[in-house]
């Protein structure tokens, strides 16, 4: 899947929007056989990843994060949470510029703790795991897990712990981040 020729995302209605190379949007009903991937798994696409800078596309409307390799192949598709009203995740093109805590716990502005944090915009915008109540907790806050797929954050992009770890391990500083509202 070419990031410049097609931007795929899915919503709970299993409707997909495809943006062609001419930037014309087409809507099509899809099912699992159409995509040839199980839609409910966050790591639905398992393409070998080269571990070199990629492109991350976050769709605020559908709360989906897609990762493309340097050859524009879709590598991983993940459900995420984006910024709620008044704290919207900013649209635009950015770059990851700092990996922070890794497996450690990073204090968030609301007093919770995220893991696998990567900064992509000044002002505190990051990719990170769903949050934990305190450092050392082995399980994230349950409501944050249930909120994946909704616009509930303060502007960051929240991911499942597994997906945040994968992103942290596979996307280097310098990786392009594109935030869209398609």
Image: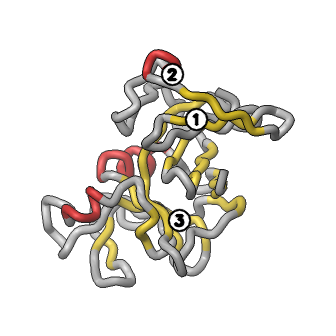
Residue at 50% over, 48% down: 64
Q: Quadrant of residue 5?
A: top right
Q: Residue furthest right?
A: 22
Above or below residue 39? Residue 107 is below
Residue at 53% over, 71% down: 125
Q: Nearer the viewer, residue 108 or 70?
A: 108
Residue at 18% over, 75% down: 134
Q: CA distance from mark 2 to mark 1?
A: 10 Å
The residue to which callout 3 is attached is 98
Residue 52 rendering spot, x and y as whole percentages: 58, 39
Residue 1 rendering spot, x and y as whole percentages: 64, 27
Q: CA distance from mark 2 to mark 3?
A: 34 Å
Q: Nearer the viewer, mark 2 or mark 1?
A: 1
Mark 1: few/some/many CA within 10 Å (<14, 14-19, 20+): some
Tell me if label 2 and label 3 are in contact, CB under 8 Å. Answer: no
The residue to which callout 2 is attached is 35
Q: Quadrant of residue 114?
A: bottom left
Above or below residue 122? Residue 139 is above
Tell me if label 2 and label 1 are in contact, CB under 8 Å. Answer: yes
The residue to which callout 1 is attached is 16
Above or below residue 87? Residue 138 is above
Residue 144 rendering spot, x and y as whole percentages: 28, 63
């Amino acid at each position: 899947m070419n990031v410049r020729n097609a931007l795929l995302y899915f919503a709970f209605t299993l409707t997909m929007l495809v943006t062609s190379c001419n930037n014309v949007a087409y809507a099509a009903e899809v099912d699992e056989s159409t995509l040839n991937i199980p839609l409910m798994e966050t790591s639905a696409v398992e393409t070998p990843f080269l571990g070199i800078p990629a492109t991350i596309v976050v769709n605020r409307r559908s709360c989906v994060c897609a990762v493309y390799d340097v050859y524009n192949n879709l590598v991983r598709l993940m459900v995420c949470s984006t910024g709620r009203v008044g704290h919207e995740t900013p649209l635009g093109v950015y770059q990851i510029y700092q990996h922070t805590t890794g497996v450690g716990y990073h204090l968030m502005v609301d007093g919770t703790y995220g893991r696998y944090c990567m900064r992509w915009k000044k002002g505190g915008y990051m990719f990170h795991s769903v949050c934990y109540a305190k450092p050392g907790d082995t399980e994230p806050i349950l409501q944050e897990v249930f909120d994946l797929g909704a616009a509930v954050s303060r502007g960051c992009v929240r991911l499942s712990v597994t997906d945040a770890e994968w992103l942290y391990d596979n996307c280097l500083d310098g990786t392009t981040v594109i935030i869209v509202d398609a």
